[in-house]
Amino acid sequence: MIFSGKMMLGNTLPATMLVMFDWNPLFHIIDQARGFAFINYNPRNSNLEYPIIMSLIFFSLGLIIQYYTNKRVSASWSAGK
């Protein structure tokens, strides 16, 4: 919960602490949502492109892994069913 960014405002973090949160796509999503929810909050240290790109990368990797696994499925995997 601490590293997701729920407890930290992206605009108030010093640069040394911002590095600890910048890798997390959830931090960017929460900070951007906070900008849409509150009138006086403008997110400066996060963007929406990063979580979208990371989601596409993880989705593509998941499809590749699923394809690889389905091609190499063994008959013994379903023997107990």
Image: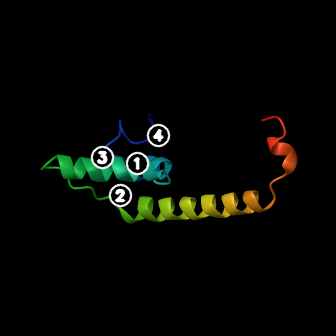
Task: Tell me if mark 2 has few (under 14), some (14-19) or many (20+) residues whose alpha carbon lies within 10 angstroms of its own.
Answer: many
Instruction: Locate residue 59 relative to residue 26 in the image: left or right.
Output: right
SS at mark 4? Answer: loop
Residue 81 drawn at (x, y percent):
77, 35
Residue to which mark 2 is pinned: 46
Mark 4 vs mark 2, CA separation in Å: 14 Å
Q: Is residue 21 positioned above or below 69 on the image?
A: above
SS at mark 2? Answer: loop
N-terminal of the pair, mark 4 or mark 2, is: 4
N-terminal of the pair, mark 3 or mark 1, is: 3
Residue 24 drawn at (x, y percent):
48, 50
Disc number placed over residue 3 in the picture, else none: 4
Instruction: State yes or no: discs 1 and 2 in contact (Cβ < 8 Å).
Output: yes
Residue to which mark 1 is pinned: 27
Q: In the picture, which quadrant includes the N terminus?
A: top left
Mark whose residue sits in front, 3 or 1: 1
- Res 13 seen here: yes
Q: Is residue 16 positioned above or below 81 on the image?
A: below
Residue to which mark 3 is pinned: 12
N-terminal of the pair, mark 2 or mark 3, is: 3
Which residue is at the front of the view, 71 or 58? Answer: 71
Mark 2 vs mark 3, CA separation in Å: 12 Å
Disc 3 residue type (three-letter): Thr
Mark 3 vs mark 4, CA separation in Å: 15 Å
Instruction: State yes or no: discs 4 and 1 in contact (Cβ < 8 Å).
Output: yes
N-terminal of the pair, mark 4 or mark 1, is: 4
Disc 1 residue type (three-letter): Phe
Residue visible at 43% across and 58% down?
A: 51
Instruction: Locate residue 64 relative to residue 45 in the image: left or right.
Output: right
Residue visible at 61% across and 58% down?
A: 62
Residue 20 drawn at (x, y percent):
49, 47
